[in-house]
Amino acid sequence: MNRLLSGLRRVSKTELSGPCPFGMGGDDRFSVWEDKGNCFCRWDCPSCPMERNTSSYGGRAGWLNKLGLEIPGHVTEWIGSGRTQYATSEDLLRLADEYYQYLDVDGIEYLASRGIDATQIRRFYIGQYGDRVMLPNIFYRRGERICSGIKGRSFRGTGKSWWAVPGTNGKRLYNLNGMFSGARELPVLVVESTIEPPMLASIGIPAVSAFAGGGYWDGAWASFFVGRKVYIVEDQDEAGRKYAAAKAQTMLWATVVQPPGNDLGEAYQNGEDIKGWYEELKDD
């Protein structure tokens, strides 16, 4: 089976651009031409499987079929009008499978530094693409495995920004199935960052977040929490307080709480007793 290219965006009717498919970084230096089936990279990495380009442009060049690369179907249609197209769940699941296989020691060590153990790596199916850990939003509906999107977070250098695979639908809750699989008497945390539910699951705390990020919240999601004790975690910055207030307006029975630090991710890295903090919430 060919490897699906990831992160492609259309720059012309026949040209696509995206990150290196061989895990060597960069967001836009790899170009693909659909009509010809060839590809080009501006860089000349020694370990690159493509051949050196002999033209004055330099870099490396090759053919998709010879490299075992494939363009995912959700970017093959011309969308120059700006109309949004989402990938199919099948496309995203194939990418998630590949990312999971790519996870290396560096990625595992980064996830461990964020409090995510091997059990949760498997459960959340966390993978890697180059210098990003990749978190797919996989859930089950009537027994069918569905992926609504994949987000990546850089862990090398100073850049820590999130990046979504084109076709990702962020307007979904993250770890919704995890919330329902645990004991219903356990309070649920609604957190801001996507990296926090796997970390909290590692210490037995059910938590969900908006996959699009803390700034997005759909009031209709309140129906998922009916009958549950809910704590909305208010990150200690202006945006965090704003986001928490917006969520609280849709769940009047929920309680807004402050984390033992600026946010729960920072609290873990500072050695705070997050489990003890949660147990105190349970006993209130």
Image (cartoon, rainbow, N blue to C red):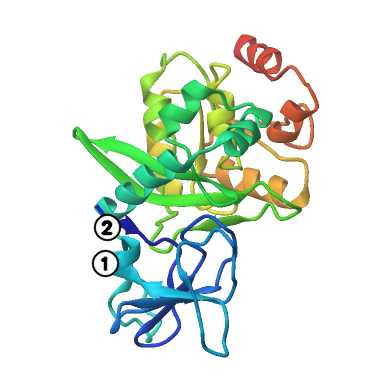
- Residue 242 placement, left or right of 43: right
Judge the density around disc 1: few (<14), some (14-19), many (≥20) Cα neighbours within 10 Å.
few
x 43%, y 45%: residue: 99
Quarter of image, res 280:
top right
Q: Which badge, 1 or 2, comes first in the chain's sequence?
A: 1
Helix or strand or loop: what does disc 1 sit on?
Answer: helix
- In the picture as drawn, the residue positioned furthest to the bottom comes out as 56
Counting from the top left corner in percent of width and height, residue 13 is at: 35, 88
Q: Nearer the viewer, residue 192 or 245?
A: 192
Q: Is residue 171 above or below residue 261?
A: below
Q: Nearer the viewer, residue 165 or 63?
A: 63
Counting from the top left corner in percent of width and height, residue 170 is at: 45, 54
CB contact under 8 Å: marks 1 and 2? yes
Counting from the top left corner in percent of width and height, residue 275 is at: 66, 15
- From the image, tell me which residue sits under label 2: 88
Quarter of image, res 45:
bottom right
Q: Nearer the viewer, residue 118 or 244?
A: 118
Q: Nearer the viewer, mark 1 or mark 2?
A: 1
- From the image, tell me which residue sits under label 1: 73
* Residue 217 can be seen in this image: no
Three-letter code for the amino acid on which mark 1 is drawn = Gly
x 38%, y 86%: residue: 80
Q: CA distance from mark 1 to mark 2?
A: 8 Å
x 38%, y 46%: residue: 98
Q: Is residue 219 above or below residue 180?
A: below
x 56%, y 44%: residue: 247
Three-letter code for the amino acid on which mark 2 is drawn = Thr
